[in-house]
Amino acid sequence: MLHHIVMWKIKDLGAEGDKATNVAKAKALLDACAQLVPGITRFEVATAQPGLEGTCDLVLNSTFADRAALAAYQTHPSHVALKPFMRKVVLERQCMDYET
C-alpha cells in the first residue's frame, strides 16, 4: 500500500476570489478525482474545521494499491487539469508518500 498525503494552505485571495471560495472549489475538484483510476483504495479530502487547531486549509489523505496506481492517478488528464487552478490559489503545499 502506498499512502499519499498532501496538505495545502490557500491564499487569502486567488483565482476565484476569497479563501473560502477557493478552498471549496479545490475540494470539489479533488473530490471529483476519487474514482479516476483502479487501485485507489482510500481518497479523503477534508477542509480545516473552525475551532480546531491546524496549519493547513485542505488535506488529501489517500491510499493506492501500489506505485503504479499512484503514477496513473498523477498523470490522469482529470488530475492534471486541476493543477493550473491549484497553482493560482495555493500559498504552501506539503506532500508525503510512504509505503506500508
Image (tube, grey):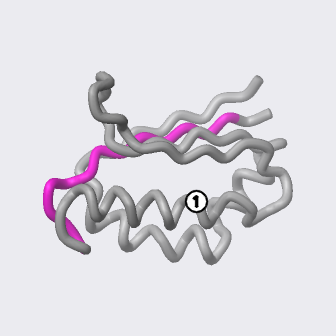
Up/down of 87 relative to 45, above or below: below
Main SS of the magenta part reads strand
Task: Please tell me whether mark 1 sits on a helix, a strand or a loop.
Answer: helix
Task: Please check the rendered image and state whether residue 10 is part of the magenta-colored stretch, yes or no.
Answer: yes
Q: Residue at left 69%, top 60%?
A: 73
Q: Position of residue 44 (x, y in %)?
A: 61, 44
> Is 24 on the left or on the right of 15, as rendered?
right
Q: Quadrant of the C terminus?
A: top right
Q: Quadrant of residue 20?
A: bottom left
Q: Position of residue 37 (x, y in %)?
A: 78, 63
User: Within 10 angstroms of label 1, few (less than 14), some, or many (20 or more) residues?
Assistant: some
Up/down of 21 relative to 70, above or below: below
Q: Residue at left 58%, top 39%?
A: 61
Can you identify the residue that label 1 sits on? 31
Q: Quadrant of the N terminus?
A: top right
Q: Residue at left 15%, top 55%?
A: 12
> Is 82 on the left or on the right of 57, as rendered?
right
Question: Which of 57 and 6 lies nearest the eye of the viewer?
Answer: 57
Q: Residue at left 73%, top 42%?
A: 42
Q: Quadrant of residue 86?
A: bottom left
> Is 23 on the left or on the right of 38, as rendered?
left
The range drawn in magenta is 3-15
> Is 82 on the left or on the right of 71, as rendered?
left
Q: Specify the farthest residue to the left.
A: 13
Amino acid bearing label 1: Asp
Q: Position of residue 74 (x, y in %)?
A: 63, 60
Total marks placed: 1
Q: Position of residue 82 (x, y in %)?
A: 48, 71
Q: Specify the farthest residue to the front.
A: 51
Task: Please check the rendered image and state whether residue 60 is part of the magenta-colored stretch, yes or no.
Answer: no
